[in-house]
Image: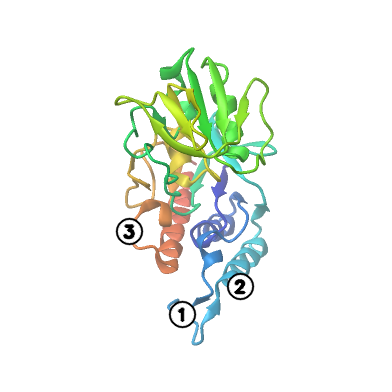
Amino acid sequence: MSTVIIIGNGPAGISASLYTARAGIDTTVIGSGYGALGKAEKIENYYGFAQPVDAKTLVDNGIAQAKHAGVTLISDEVVGIGYGAKLQVSTKTQVLEADYVLLATGASRSTPNIPGLKDLEGHGVSYCAVCDAFFYRGKDVAVLGSGEYAMHEAAELLPVVGSVTILTNGAELTGILPGGAKVDNRKIAEFAGDGVVERAVFEDGEQIDISGVFIAVGVAGSTDLAKKLGAATEGNRILVDETMATNVPGLYAAGDCTGGMLQIAKAVYQGAQAGTSIVAAIRKKK
């Protein structure tokens, strides 16, 4: 039986899951929390509600609807995606495989506001360890972050690079530090270098020499995950066709991560389109 993993339990991901599950396809949704809707107090412009609806209630109702349709819901954080016999999705606790994967975790986070990062993007500042580790063979690099996503990126880098230092920028380390990695908790003043990353300068005036820094603050967004599989992106959005398919076979994206109008109505529509497109792709193979 074909299987689908949907990353993200918001309106886009849940909408897609309703279509795949009701078509008899084994569907798993991985996600936790409320995403951007967790910051919204009331929703007043969504079809069918005469009175403002609580945003968290809307999310909870959608999840309950998916469970009723037979969707498997896993509360976990996705830290990586790659290839095995099928598409592989790595969480903090396990590795799952599926024939199709839908990215629906919302828009990617912005780059931390540390001087030097924006200016040196593509010149030592990277957002994908799997993609770019090769370019830093035997060199000293840093990972900016403090959670499980940062630890996962560090683990990907360690077999290739010379050394890895986790820079938490003053945050508490919440992930499990991989063996061989170092950690520095000091606040960062800037990343600097002559046209390329050469050092991290701390607020206490001290610095460490590095050849690159990998950004992994918070959790992995849809765009971060898409890049790991070589999916085409433009800025912080994933490029998709009219079926919500990316250029990577079996990989789809829907919702805020595709850019455009950041509205629930658009996310629900794109989720429905992605779900029906996956169903059509599976039936075409039979």
Secondary structure under tag 3 reads: loop
| Quadrant in the rendering for residue 86 | top right
Percent of width and height locating residue 211: 43, 21
Label of residue 57 in the image: 2
Q: Residue at x 63, y 54 (%)?
A: 32
Q: CA distance from mark 1 to mark 3?
A: 20 Å
Dot 1 and dot 3 residues touching (CB under 8 Å)? no
Secondary structure under tag 1 reads: loop
Q: Earlier in the sequence, mark 3 or mark 2?
A: 2
Tell me if 172 is positioned left or right of 144 in this view.
right
Q: CA distance from mark 3 to mark 2?
A: 25 Å
Circle 1 packing at 10 Å, graded few (<14), some (14-19), many (20+), is: few
Work out whether residue 191 can be spotted: yes
Give the residue pinned by disc 3.
260
Work out whether residue 98 can be spotted: no
Q: Residue furthest front?
A: 205
Label of residue 44 in the image: 1
Label 2 amino acid?
Answer: Thr
Dot 3 and dot 2 residues touching (CB under 8 Å)? no
Label of residue 240 in the image: none
